[in-house]
Amino acid sequence: MPRIGIIGSGFGAIAVATEFLQHGYGDVRLWEKADSLGGVWRDNVYPGAACDVPSPFYSFSFAPWPSWPRRYAEQPAILRYLRAVAEREGVTARTRFGAGVVAAAWNGACWLVTLEDGTTDEVDLLVSAVGQLSTPTVPSLPGAESFAGPAFHTARWPQDLDVRGLRVAVIGAAATAVQAVPALAPVAERVILFQRTPSYIWPKPDAVYPRWYRRIAAVIERPFFRGLGELFSRQLDPDSIAARIGAAVTRAHLRLRVRDPALRRALTPDYPIGCRRILFSNNFYPALCRDDVDLVTAGIQRIEPGAVVTADGRSHPADVLVCATGFDAQSFLRGIRITGPGGKDLHEHWSAGARAHLGIYVPGFPNLLLSYGPNTNLGGSSIIRMLEAEARHMRLAVDRMVSSGARTLEATPAAEQAWDDEVQTRLAGTAWVSCDSWYRHPVTGRITSNWPGGTNRYVARVRDLVEDEFVWR
């Protein structure tokens, strides 16, 4: 049986490890740079951190959870679930913690993996499960190093930080800020939110689950929200009825929640719905209506030791500086050098934007598999369904490799090109092409992150292994 190595320990890694373990592959090992399991749900502990996909659907199909406390679970509950599944499936015991991977090189027979401490490991198949949202993006602002108080990205929130009585400046007004600002506002002396671009925000149909309903919710709500997720994804077609309905619902939500015309104008997007991530919140708009919360739309000119100065010349005093500025979703496998046959560098190969057959296999890099790879992110629905579908296809490919006596598997360039042509053609008809966003490569403009649509079409496409799309050696 082949030795299978997995980089990471989040949802993608656990999906892949469980798929192989459940089908008899005993040598599965995971490398995790942190000292505990959990991926983004371990790292993101900022106030208000939660998921915007309903919990019964944001969970593995093979591990329904009868203990979700509410429909949209918060970070501690998601992390608890993830660790319980990993323990149950034997993944935790196979994980080496404090083992950051810095390089992996194909030596002609296997992958030689180098860790931060200089030690090495060898595996026959290498799976990257580092995801698209693991490297924080921090803007380069003049004077940032001079700020006197705590300054950090939300994914690096200090565990011991107490913001009571402090003025908190939050840079960025998208998904993270929509959760963090309402949690900070009742505690901090003042919250100043610096917004560059407003978002479309749907009301969030959240609810606390009564204990008697939790087991039922895990069963009956999953198929309901799976179907709803497919409908929600249709908003990405700017000419669709769904897009018109989505825009109308979000604008009605804004009108009902924000009575101040000037504030409402500042919060109204001027781009098609779906171009940027569509958000969910019931308490973001009310938080911005508080007297102790300020919305600032002027650009930031510089940072001073105790203030943020904007382009209009105003100085906004602050004791804490928080960057809710998202992640570098374009630098797949950032910080890890992947070297294929003949010294081929994966990052150079992807210089115009990452791409992979089915989002999983890169021609020219044998036995390298990607979980949550290029063009598998979603604008709606649950990424967990995508991760499970990818993991199953990986296992089918390895089954075929083993049964045939082959030592390597690799997608053909023709199959990858046909796949990429199909995906990019479909993406050209979505709202994502109408504005800049983190979904697109900063130089070429290529959409490298997202899958065009809901999950049903992708799951159907990867359900079976098409053998002639691969070379088996």
Image (cartoon, rainbow, N blue to C red):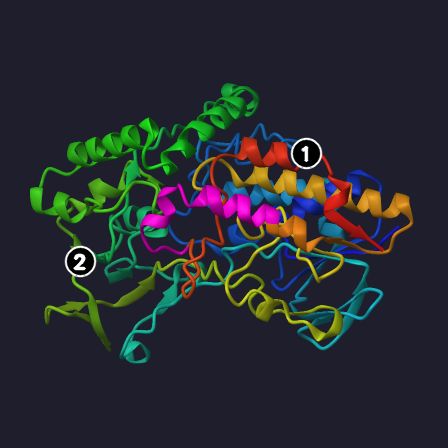
Amino acid type shown at disc 2: Thr
Looking at the image, can residue 361 be seen? no
Q: Earlier in the sequence, mark 1 or mark 2?
A: 2
Q: Tell me, yes or no, whether the highlighted magenta stretch contains residue 423.
A: yes
Q: Tell me, yes or no, whether the highlighted magenta stretch contains residue 44.
A: no
In the rendered view, would you say 337 is above or below 47?
below
Residue extending furthest right? 405
The image position of residue 238, as x and y in percent, is 32, 37
As rendered, which of 66 and 363 lies closer to the eye?
363
Residue 297 image label:
2
Check the picture and name the quadrant holding the C terminus.
bottom right
In the rendered view, would you say 131 is above or below 74?
below
Q: Residue at x 31, y 38 (%)?
A: 281
Looking at the image, can residue 167 be seen? yes
The image quarter containing residue 364 is: bottom right
Magenta stretch bounds: 418-438
Amino acid type shown at disc 1: Arg
The image position of residue 452, as x and y in percent, is 47, 41
Q: Residue at x 58, y 27 (%)?
A: 66
**Mark 2 residue element:** loop
As rendered, which of 436 and 180 lies closer to the eye?
436
Residue 189 image label:
none
Magenta part mainly helix, strand or loop? helix
* Crowd band around label 1 with a 10 angstrom C-alpha radius: few (<14), some (14–19), many (20+): few
Mark 1 or mark 2: which is in front? 1
Residue 463 image label:
1
